[in-house]
Amino acid sequence: MNTLKNGGPLPRDLVTRKSLENACAAVAATGGSTNAALHIPAIEHEADARFVLDDVSEVLARTPLIGDLQPGGKYLVLGSVSRRWRACGVERAVRRRLPAW
């Protein structure tokens, strides 16, 4: 918080086209919310990272589903799975699914 209070970094200093591609891939790989297709270009707009809805669509199309965590999906996020997801994040969830995939 002190860093932010002292004027930086701003979102446009952190958000890049590559980070937005990674966010889209994480959403697609885990069966995430379709709202991401709207939120990610909105983030792009604020960060001025040149990433539009067509870019989101391209990343979603090329990314395989490796963990169906969507509501009602095969790996519904409840109980211990939900706690593990919050504690470990996307990278750990993907690494756990890849050997079985």
Image: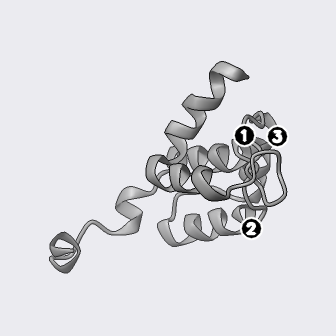
Badge 2 or badge 1: first in the primary sequence: 2
For residue 58, which numbered disc appears in the image? none
Q: Residue furthest top?
A: 99
Rendering coords of residue 69 (x, y %): 73, 50
Residues at discs 3 and 1 in contact (Cβ within 8 Å): no
Badge 3 or badge 2: first in the primary sequence: 2
Of residues 81 and 37, the one drawn nearer to the viewer in this rendering? 81
Circle 2 packing at 10 Å, graded few (<14), some (14-19), many (20+), is few
- Circle 3 residue: 61
Q: Residue visible at 77% across and 55% down?
A: 70
Say above or below: 4 vs 14: below
Query: In the picture, residue 96 is in which quadrant?
Result: top right
Circle 3 packing at 10 Å, graded few (<14), some (14-19), many (20+), is few
Query: In the picture, residue 93 is in which quadrant?
Result: top right
Q: Quadrant of the N terminus?
A: bottom left
Residues at discs 2 and 1 in contact (Cβ within 8 Å): no
Rendering coords of residue 83 (x, y %): 52, 56
- Circle 1 residue: 67
What element does badge 1 sit on?
A: loop
- Circle 2 residue: 35
Of residues 87 and 66, the one drawn nearer to the viewer in this rendering? 87
- The residue type indicated by label 3 comes to Ala
Residues at discs 3 and 2 in contact (Cβ within 8 Å): no
Rendering coords of residue 49 (x, y %): 52, 58
Rendering coords of residue 67 (x, y %): 72, 40
Q: CA distance from mark 3 to mark 1?
A: 16 Å
- The residue type indicated by label 1 comes to Gly
Badge 3 or badge 1: first in the primary sequence: 3
Q: Residue visible at 64% across and 25% down?
A: 98
How was the colour assigned to the protein in this rendering? one colour
